[in-house]
Every structure is written in structure tokens, then in C-alpha cells.
Image: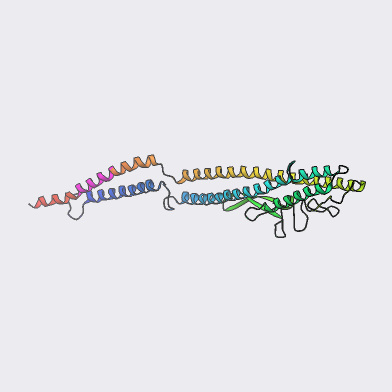
Amino acid sequence: MGSSLLTNSSAMTALQTLRNVSSQLATTQNRISTGQRVSTASDNAAYWSIATSMRADNAALSAVSDSLGLSAATVDTEYTALTAVVGDKTGGLTKLQSLLVQAKTAGIDRGKIQADITQIQQQMKNTADAATFNGVNWLSATASTPATFDLVSSFSRVKSTPTIGSITLTISSYSLYTSGTSGILDTPTSGVSVANLTITSLTDAATDQATLDTYIAQVTAAINKVATAAADLGAVKNRISTNTEFVKTLMDSVDRGIGQLVDADMNAESTRLQALQTQQQLGVQALSIANQNSQSILSLFR
């Protein structure tokens, strides 16, 4: 083909090559600046969609982790109070039981023993009332206290169907006092409950001694029930702790999965950047040379 003044094929080819190199260079620079090879849906629609869904799942798992932290604090508060109510030789139901056994001693001043019993009863009620975290109290239940309490423990999604896992607790298993006097400590037996029993008027008579035996059996049963409730909450604490660690590990796993889909290989991108920059410089020189071909036509008319 002869020289043409209107059509410079060499320049057109060089320009097309330069445009292609510049486009690749822009893509590489974007990957380096964002750290992602798929940052928008136009980069790879399938991978972008999957990564977006996985990020949403991770946000839900983060909420589950926060909920588990709140649940752990709530359970720990109730567990601590139950443990205090069980008590030891210095207080709580354990001390109350020993005082009642002591009250069976002939000739003892049961009025003075009752003074200690009253203090223990008041302290247990105060402990139950104080077992409140974020407005939640399972030990001193009111009419508005729900029958069950769900602790969010997990999140999973199969295709488009999410599943929220929870730990369901029955509040009556832990309530020491209720508005209907049906708690572990305020449920009356023959008109008397652990919360209001009194021995001031009891004597050494056989009937009164039998009454003391009834009180002792009642307190012993309460100790077993409260200890069982505390043990149950202890197991829930362990489950929450295990779930918390699992959720954190799962979130890390999802992050790694997202990275595999959309993160850029910075080593490869760095190498590609240097190569493209060199190609761009050569493309500019090639275009410059091609543009000079038109100038050579002028020499034909000199």
C-alpha cells in the first residue's frame, strides 16, 4: 500500500495498542489502590454477588457475637446470684439450714436464732432483686417476666434461607421469688415458705420439733433446687463461651473465603504494573514514530 495522507494505518495501530495498554494499566492501578481484583459487579458479577452475600452473613455473625456477649453477661449475673443464695457456712440457704438444725437443741433461745434467720431471708431477697442485667431479672420474677427467654446463639444461611439458632431457657426453673409466690423460695408448704418461715414461737415440744424437721427438709429441698438451677446456668455459660469462640472462628473463615474470591494478588499486580508501564512508554514512542510518517510525504514535493 502506498503512502496516504488521509489514512495513517501505522498510527491507527499504535493508537489502538496504546489504548489497550492504558486500559489494562488503569485496571491494574485500581486493583493496587483498592487491594481487590473484584471491587464492583462489572469486574466479575458472580464473584461480586457471592462476596456481597458473604459479607452480609458476616455482619449477621457479628451481631450474633454481640448478642452472645450480652447473653453471657446476663447468665453470669443470674448464676452469681444463685451461687450466693446457696451460700456457705456464713450465709445463704446453707447457713439457714445449719441454724434450723441448731434450733432443735433443747432449751436454746430460738428468738436469737430467728434474728439470724430473718437477716438471711432478707439478704436472699435482696440478692435476687439485685440480679438484674440490662433490665433482665430471672430470679425475682414479676407478672411481666416472660415464661421463656431465648438467647441468640448462631446464624446460618442455606441459599436464600437464613436460620437463627437460640438457647431457650425456662424462667420458672430459676425464679426464687415470683408475683404469684410460686418461686423456689416463696412457694408455701402448709402455709410456710423458706422466705417467711419463723421459729420464734417454737418450743421443745414434740410437735414443734416435728415442725422444725419440716422446715429443715424444706430448706434442704430448696438448696437442691437452687443448686440444680445454678448448675444448669453454669452449663449454659459454657455453651455460650463455646459458641462465642466458634462464631469468631467462623467469621475469620468467611473473611478468608471472601479474600479468595475478590482480593488482588499484590505480587502479581506489582509485576504487571511495571510491565504495563514499560508497554505504555513503548506505545507512546511507536505512536510518535507513526505520526512522523505523514511528515515524510512532504519531502516528495520539495
In the image, taking residue 290 as reference, residue 92 lies left or right, namely right
Q: Position of residue 19 (x, y in %)?
A: 29, 50
Q: Please say whether residue 292 is visible from this viewpoint.
A: yes
Check if residue 216 falls in the magenta segment: no
Q: Is residue 269 above or below residue 6?
A: above
Q: Residue furthest right?
A: 206
Q: Position of residue 244 (x, y in %)?
A: 59, 44
Q: Position of residue 264 (x, y in %)?
A: 41, 44
Q: Residue furthest bottom?
A: 143
Determine the residue positioned at 59% across, 52% down.
162
Q: Who is closer to the viewer here, 4 or 106? A: 106
How many circles with numbers are drawn on the protein?
0
Check if residue 284 falls in the magenta segment: yes
Determine the residue positioned at 11% across, 52% down.
298
Overall secondary structure of the magenta stretch?
A: helix
Q: Who is closer to the viewer here, 247 or 44? A: 247
Q: Who is closer to the viewer here, 265 or 43? A: 265
In the image, taking residue 192 as reference, residue 263 lies left or right, namely left
Q: Please say whether residue 174 is visible from this viewpoint.
A: no
In the image, taking residue 270 as reference, residue 82 lies left or right, namely right
Q: Who is closer to the viewer here, 31 or 240? A: 240
Determine the residue positioned at 58% across, 42% down.
245
In the image, taking residue 182 as reference, residue 107 lies left or right, namely right
Q: Is residue 55 above or below residue 179?
A: above
Residue range in magenta is: 278-290
Q: Position of residue 15 (x, y in %)?
A: 26, 50
Looking at the image, what colour scheme do you see?
rainbow
